[in-house]
Amino acid sequence: MHNPQLTKDGKLKHLLTTEGLPRAILNQILDTAESFVGVAEREVKKVPLLRGKTVCNIFFENSTRTRTTFEIAAKRLSADVITLNVGTSSQSKGETILDTVDNLTAMHADMFVVRHAESGAAHFIAQHVAPHIHVINAGDGRHAHPTQGLLDVFTIRRYKPEMHNLRVALVGDVLHSRVARSEIHALTTLGIPEVRVIAPKTLLPQHVEKLGVQVYHDMNEGLKDVDVIMMLRLQNERMNGALLPSAQEYFKCYGLTQEKLALAKPDAIVMHPGPMNRGVEIDSAVADGKQSVILPQVTYGIAVRMAVMSILAGNSE
Ligand code: CP
């Protein structure tokens, strides 16, 4: 079956999900991002790859990291960047998503970066836009957040280059997490030998093991000898009903403390996609500790988003 995010000759046309993306394209993005890391260290932090192109950020859902790093990335590529504040746009007067997209297309947009609370929103827009336009999913419901998954893998690769040898644990609300899905697809496609999920049964999707992960319900067992710990945010806004006894009880069982971190390998890295709930998912001593790479994840997000946008622009019809 044809992958809607690829051209007929197998190049990246849109980035909607890491699911089904060939390993060669994942590596192309990671390798290209490597070449952009140094741009941030230059006096003039710009390259001309998207000069004359217009990137439109449309965020129907709140964001700190993704929206700003996409904007910085597009500017570093010399694009013209529009960030539509949906709260003050004509969406509030009843305009449909596709009408908003059509109007921005009439202003000669070349690329849309879309975040939406509904799963499938970015696919829907990608099916609608003209052939020369690219769509990047910046997070849709609980479905996918491909650039977050990719920047997490990029961060892992930077700190743990021996990727063929790693044990990675994702901890917490896998059920509602688009980040977890995007990461699991990327990590398994890249051949990471052991990907674990650690969570209570109520926060795991049914048949999660079919994604190629090992399932643990106990942190003491699941964290043993891992190289990478990826903590996940409790997605309270996507929970229907009480899936947890209390935040305190959750922290006791699944919060990452120094004591639990000591179960992992001594040089294990600690990650979190943000926003963090300190004292619920992670103790501040760990979040701000020497094994934490949470802020480097944000920095690398710029290089990864530059890579995705430059590859898409290079594949224009
Ligand atoms: N990780 C992430 O998507 O953060 P934001 O919601 O702040 O963009």
Image (spheres, rainbow, N blue to C red):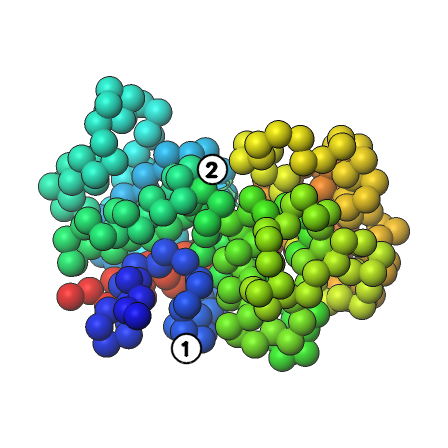
- Return the residue at label 1: 24
Foreground: disc 1 or disc 2:
1
Q: Which residue is mark 2?
A: 63
Q: Position of residue 31 (x, y in %)?
A: 45, 73
Question: Spatial distance from mark 1 to mark 2, Cα to Cα?
Answer: 30 Å
Left or right of 162, for residue 313:
left
- Whichever of callouts 1 and 2 sits on the residue coming sooner in the sequence is 1
Quarter of the picture containing the C terminus is: bottom left
Question: Which residue corresponds to the image point at 49% horizontal and 38% vertical from the top-left?
Answer: 64
Cβ–Cβ below 8 Å for labels 1 and 2? no
Question: Does any atom of ligand 1 lie closer than 8 Å to the CB of label 2?
Answer: yes
Give neighbour class at mark 2: few <14, some 14-19, many 20+ (Cα, 10 Å). some
- Residue 115 in the image: x percent, y percent? 39, 42
Give above or below for 197 relative to 138: below
Residue at the image position 77 percent from the left and 46 percent from the top: 254
Look at label 2 and name its amino acid.
Ser
Quadrant for the N terminus, please: bottom left
Residue at the location (68% across, 65% down)?
A: 214
Q: Is residue 178 above or below residue 150?
A: above
The residue closer to the viewer here, 29 or 209, is 209
Dividing the picture into quarters, in which one does residue 281 lie?
top right
